[in-house]
Image (spheres, helix red, strand yellow):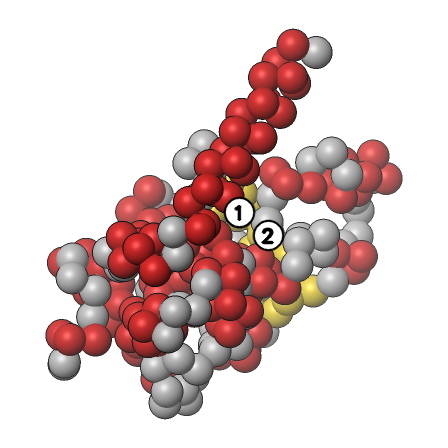
Amino acid sequence: MDTENLPPTFKGRQYEVRALGLRDFAGLRREDEPLEPFELAYFAKLLVINFDEIAGLSEETREHLLGVGVNDWSGGTSSRPLPNGWRLVILNPKHGKARNNATLMEEVCHVFLGHKANRLSIVAQNKQGKTVARDYNEADEEAAYAVGAAALVPFAGLRRLLKQNRTSIEMARHFNVSRELVEYRLKVCRLWAEYRQRHPEEDAARELRRRAFAAAKEVDSRQ
């Protein structure tokens, strides 16, 4: 394999090779072609159902999941399969398609990588802001997230858009993912320094967002 189109780190290359295998399985031929996780979910025997189809949830629980707790979860996959071997997946309906794409892709990767969960897997964010499936061990969580992210935003395609001076927002729109996922990929692929050099105006905006977030947290802590 041409290592020129792989990330520079050993672990990054391992994840990228698996991700490229998924993209090839999905029939993608161009390095910058967007991947559709919902199509791969079919081959992983994952059935995505509407949140409103969940039976047995109390009104209080439903209101919490879609209200104050909406940012505490991204999706869930049942570990117990249906009689036909498929598993149910629920995605947070309040999250946009970009975030749902990443959540579903992580669940798809758990299947293709042969990971096993013991019970309902709730996908949320840890203190580093990374999406995690709490019922998998740490190594499986890392691998599924990293491979899924690489499949959605492959190194070669990301680098091509970088050379075209695309912003992270433009890249995110191109790959149908969130800006945060694109910036994560830029960092783990060791392209972040070049990106910042190409877009120095974003550093100031990023610092303003950081200060606003810190100020909001301080206000909340005083209440």
Depth order, front residue of 69/29: 29
The residue singled out by tag 2 in the image is 75
Looking at the image, the residue that sits furthest to the right is: 59
- Provide residue 204's location: percent of width, then percent of height: 46, 42
Q: Which mark is residue 198?
A: none
- Provide residue 133's location: percent of width, then percent of height: 47, 47
Question: Does residue 128 appear to the left or right of 140 in the view shown?
Answer: right
Question: Does residue 32 appear to the left or right of 47 in the view shown?
Answer: left
Depth order, front residue of 204/62: 204
The disc labelled 1 sits on which kind of residue? Val
4 relative to 185, above or below: below
> Contact, CB < 8 Å: mark 1 with mark 2?
yes
Question: Picture quarter containing residue 116?
Answer: bottom left
The residue singled out by tag 1 in the image is 123
Which residue is depicted at the point 57% across and 74% down? 38
The disc labelled 2 sits on which kind of residue? Gly
Q: What SS does tag 2 mark?
A: strand
- Quadrant in the picture for the C terminus: top right
* Chain-order first, disc 1 or disc 2: 2
Residue 106 seen in this snapshot: no
